[in-house]
Amino acid sequence: MRSDDKNDESTFSNRIKEQEARKVKAQSEDTESPWLGLGMFGIVGWSVVVPSLLGTLLGLWLDLHYPVRISWTLSLLVAGLCIGCLMAWYWVVTEEKDIHK
């Protein structure tokens, strides 16, 4: 083995050690802030609002083009709300599992 190869291996090992030390330090520090909570709150909110809004818009269009006895708007608003709540619940459960790992 040449001395250049040993030097390259040593440099590579040192870089790996430094990266590992930074990662361990970052994991040990408390990085939670109020902004993280507000960001999660926003994501959960949007995951409920978007399907509800899409359901309402589709319901309005269906009410205009295919009127029936039951309101499409109200029905699809409730369906969108349910789908949005399920999506938010799934996202929160997934994030909670990741946090506890």
Image: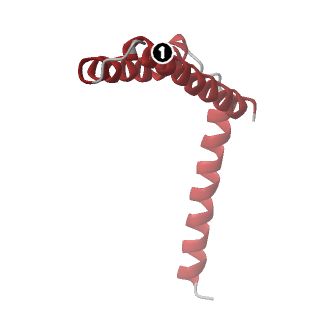
Q: Could you tell me which residue is drawn at 60 percent across and 50 percent down?
A: 18
Q: In the rendering, at what x and y percent does residue 76 appear? A: 43, 19
Residue furthest front as drawn: 69
Residue in the image at 33% along x and 24% along y: 58
Location of residue 24 (image quadrant): top right
Dividing the picture into quadrants, the one containing residue 59 is top left
Q: Along the line of sight, which residue is nearer the eye, 41 or 68?
A: 68
Q: Which residue position is annotated with label 1?
A: 45
**Helix, strand or loop for disc 1:** helix
Above/below status of 1 relative to 96: below
Looking at the rendered image, the quarter that the C terminus falls into is: top right
- Outermost residue toward the right in this view: 100
Which residue occupies the foreground of this view, 26 or 67?
A: 67
In screen coordinates, is 72 left or right of 31?
A: left
Q: Which residue lies furthest to the bottom in this view?
A: 1
Image-based side of 45 in relation to 86, left or right? left
Amino acid type, label 1: Gly
Q: Please give the name of the residue rendered at 56% of the width and 81% of the height, measured from the top-left corner.
A: 5
User: Residue 98 at x, y = what percent?
Assistant: 68, 34
Relative placement, left or right, of 59 versus 37 is: left
